[in-house]
Amino acid sequence: SFVCAFYLRAMPRAGHPLQTISSAQADECVTRDGASVEECLAALHRNSNIEGRSSSRSSNKADSGTRICFTHDAIAVRQVPGHGAGLCVLTDVPQGSLLFACCPFALAQRASLPGTIVKKLQTCSDDDRSRFFSLYDGTTTDRTLPTVSELVVDLDPATSAAPNRSVDAMRIDKIIKFNCIDYDSLNEHGASKEADLCGIWLLPAFLNHSCRPNVQLTFLGDLLLCRAAQSLASGDELLVAYVSTFQPRHIRRARLQEEWAFECGCPRCMVEGTLVPACLAEPLVQKLDLLVDNIEKRGLKDSAAGFAELAQVVKKEVSVAVDSNTARVDSNGPLKAACKHLWGNVDKKERSAKLERLLLGSFLPTFKGTAFAWKQLGEIQRCLAAYDECLKLLEEVCAGSAYHARWAAICASQASTGGRATTSEVARRAQYAWHWNSVCHGHAACRVVIERLGWPHSLFEAAQQIPGMAVPETTATQSPTGESKQKDAASLCDQPTTTSANVRQRWDYSLVATENGILLLTLPLPEGVQLADVDLDVANDSVLVSCQQKGPSDLAPLRVQLPQKVDATNAPPAKYKKQYRQLILKLPVASRPDV
């Protein structure tokens, strides 16, 4: 079903090799071919599909053939009280900074991973073997901690030792249990896909867990990238989510205990355990499960209403829980300290609003199910309202994640092509999406990633109207002293609404290359233009769009230059989506360049 994946899945823990790069800024760190690390990553994005997987799944080489391996020089491996070995930053790090880009020690199908690692350990260098066995294996005995430079390396498979070296298979299984990371991805709807691969990445294995992570992991080819989801202060520990942060505390804790044998005591868990205990959360979970199980039986329209109704029930229950516990939070020392750790020194009204969003995040699949169902039904205004709620919740429980970036981009696209949003509203959503995609994927790759989602050119223009891509109502996490730790996201100023009366209309379009050799051209019809008024002239290298209608707007013809030659003769007729007022052209790429 389209929503159960958000609820049931476990989040992942997310030639001529280049020497390991260590720098404070990835966009200033230049590789041997003169390109920055961020530019190399953008090149990799151009060569990957929408899921971030390269055409050669094991490759992380940019166009120049440079193999990328990067670590921010502020990172260090440290013993963290209550957590054991972990990764910390030694200086302040801005939001969105690339912290590391790591190659895998081993990557394979889950059933094959132990055998793959055994074979590698039998033939790898002594240094590589020591690196692998420095990983946590479930024991509490003291171990010598490696340095970051020892863990972020471009492993050379040509280096080998005696092929008959003995290995401890049981210890290998334990290391896999506690350190394996699923190679996960999102589908075209922004939902998680079942991971078909998993692996061991050495440096990321030292990341500890939080149900409110401050860094996010993404995959690009076989590279595992880590970026700061918020601004980090010197001394902060880097924390990821081992399990889905979109589910209630009792489910998160059960999974953590089963898979990693520990009980989470993060500030979010402390607050949630008091305000929304399992006896309150579980009935809501059961209602969600029932909705999901009966989607086909009830039909999409009835299911959409069911999700929307359940979302209101959840909001009411959470609101009552927060309001009735205000005095308790003020008088309970640990609870008050947990809230201060989460948001710093905020007044009671702001704290209550943040508490509600934090607690609602544990039921996020209900809100996402509502948004997706309204989107499928073409109810754009309802879809946008539901997506807006999802994005606010994501800022609290999974900020800067691939979900956050993708859903923000989808929301902006919906507002642009099918909603009744004003120009300023569309611009606000576009800038919000641009900001969070830059946080998730890096500023150099941001446009490449969003283009794959079919954004029209007008959205890119709107996203860049204000320098810095400021974010509306963004979450500014604070230190315990109350000082803001997120200084790079400011509130977005309202912009004047632009109407068709004072701006001449023009054509807009999006062009996406699909994996099956098709160029997909989408043309929204401008206001007042009817389907019968549109002329399309498809050539092998371009598409000419013109309007027969004459009027005040007098649309100038649009010529879309195609990035590849197409077989215009065999292109199917354009299709018209009435509910979105869009023309869709599927142009087959020419099999011969001389067509």
Image (spheres, grey):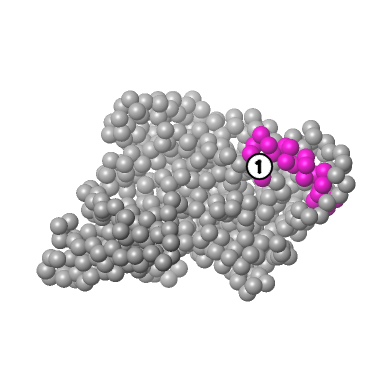
Whether residue 408 sits left or right of residue 384 in the image: it is: right
* 9 relative to 207 in the view: left or right: left
Q: Quadrant of residue 94?
A: bottom right
Q: How many marks?
A: 1
Q: Is residue 3 left or right of residue 523?
A: right
- Of the pair 399 and 487, the residue shown nearer to us: 399
Is residue 491 in view? no
Q: Which residue is mark 1?
A: 108
Q: Where in the figure is residue 464, as x and y percent of width and height?
A: 40, 68
In the depicted structure, whether residue 424 falls above or below residue 278:
below
Above or below for 85 versus 5: below
Q: Is residue 501 left or right of residue 572?
A: left
Residue 190, percent across and down? 44, 46
* Residue 247 image point, x, y percent: 50, 36
The one of 237 and 56 positioned closer to us in this rendering: 56
Q: Residue at x 75, y 49 (%)?
A: 79
Judge whether residue 147 is colored magenta. no
For label 1, count other residues whose C-alpha is less than 10 Å away and answer few (under 14), some (14-19) or many (20+). some
Read off the magenta span: 107-129
Q: Quadrant of the N terminus?
A: top left
Quadrant in the picture for the C terminus: bottom left
Task: Say which element carries label 1.
Answer: strand
**Residue at 43 percent of width and 65 percent of height:** 593
Residue depicted at 65% across the width and 65% down the height: 66
Identify the main secondary structure in magenta.
helix
**Amino acid type indicated by mark 1:** Ala
> Image point 70% across, 51% down: which residue?
203
The percent position of residue 250, horizontal first and vertical second, equals: 55, 30
Give the residue at the far bottom of this rendering: 34
Residue 128 highlighted magenta (yes or no): yes
For residue 285, say whether it is visible: yes
